[in-house]
Image (cartoon, rainbow, N blue to C red):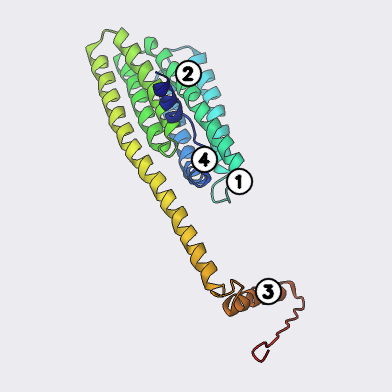
Amino acid sequence: MKKLAGALRTLMSVPADNPRLLEAQYVALSRQLPLMYFVLLVNTWALAFTHRETAPVWLTLLVPLLLTVICGIRARKWLLTVNRPPPAAATILATLRGTNSLAGVIAAGFAAWSLSLYPYGGPYAQAHVAFFMGITVIVCIFCMMHLRPAALTTAVVVNTAFVIFFASTHNLIFIATAVNIVLVSIGMLIILHHQYRDFTSLVDVQVRTEQLSNENLLLANQDSLTGLPNRRQFFQTLDAAMSEALALRSKLAVGVLDLDGF
């Protein structure tokens, strides 16, 4: 039981032992999460619009406004990181853990709001609620595929609410729809698991490739007998120093000692 709990805790948490993986996840999410929030808000206002004449104002206007503010703040935060150098590893880890923690809360908020609209609509409006929840979980899984715990949390929260609520309606059509969405989500999560594994493997390969490249560069710039910098490193250092001197319009002095006759 303890092993199962530990495995589940590991699966649903952001690992902190691979800084390069965290950086790659951060860069990927900075491009995908703003799109996710945009799609969520468009779907939210579309659902609110179809219930505008039957549901209370606080459900069709006030709650969507609150969700818009929350998603807008989150989307803006991620948009500001696009095409910018990643921050320190500790900042990245804190950001990803915060995103992982908020995923379940935001998913629960959207699910609770959409299901609250169900009693106020006719058959078509109720079908729109089911469609909203189904398409929402699919979009979230795709956009958060590089942060597996957040995608899993969102899928579990939305699908659990979806199945329990629509099963309680005793409507065979909605029950079949809920089962269908659950099966689709399971299939997507399996694909996500394989994609995430390939993603982490690719990051590890890049790290090993860079290490080998750095080792080769070090060997190419050292004398194999003494381990001291060789002629190649001297000229590379000289070129860099001259470029810096030209850029700063400063002077550069070079001293050369010929030890061949020593």
How many numbered markers are drawn?
A: 4
Mark 1 vs mark 4: which is more N-terminal? 4
Q: Is residue 59 left or right of residue 257?
A: left
Tell us which disc is closer to us: 4 or 3: 4
Q: Is 195 rendered above or below residue 105?
A: below
Residue tagged by mark 3? 241
**Label 1, label 4: how many angstroms apart (C-alpha)?**
17 Å
* Image coords of residue 114 (percent x, y): 42, 18
Mark 1 vs mark 2: which is more N-terminal? 2
Tell us which disc is closer to us: 3 or 1: 3
Mark 3 vs mark 1: which is more N-terminal? 1
**Label 3, label 1: how many angstroms apart (C-alpha)?**
28 Å
Three-letter code, disc 1: Pro
Under circle 4, the secondary element is loop
Residue 257 placement: quadrant: bottom right
Under circle 3, the secondary element is helix
Q: Is residue 215 left or right of residue 131?
A: right
* Image coords of residue 2 (percent x, y): 43, 20
Disc ID at residue 17: 4
Three-letter code, disc 4: Asp
Three-letter code, disc 3: Ala
The residue drawn where x is 49% and y is 36% is 15
Q: Quadrant of the C terminus?
A: bottom right
Disc ID at residue 87: 1
Q: Nearer the viewer, residue 157 or 1?
A: 1
Mark 4 vs mark 3: which is more N-terminal? 4
**Label 4, label 3: how many angstroms apart (C-alpha)?**
37 Å
Residue tagged by mark 2? 60
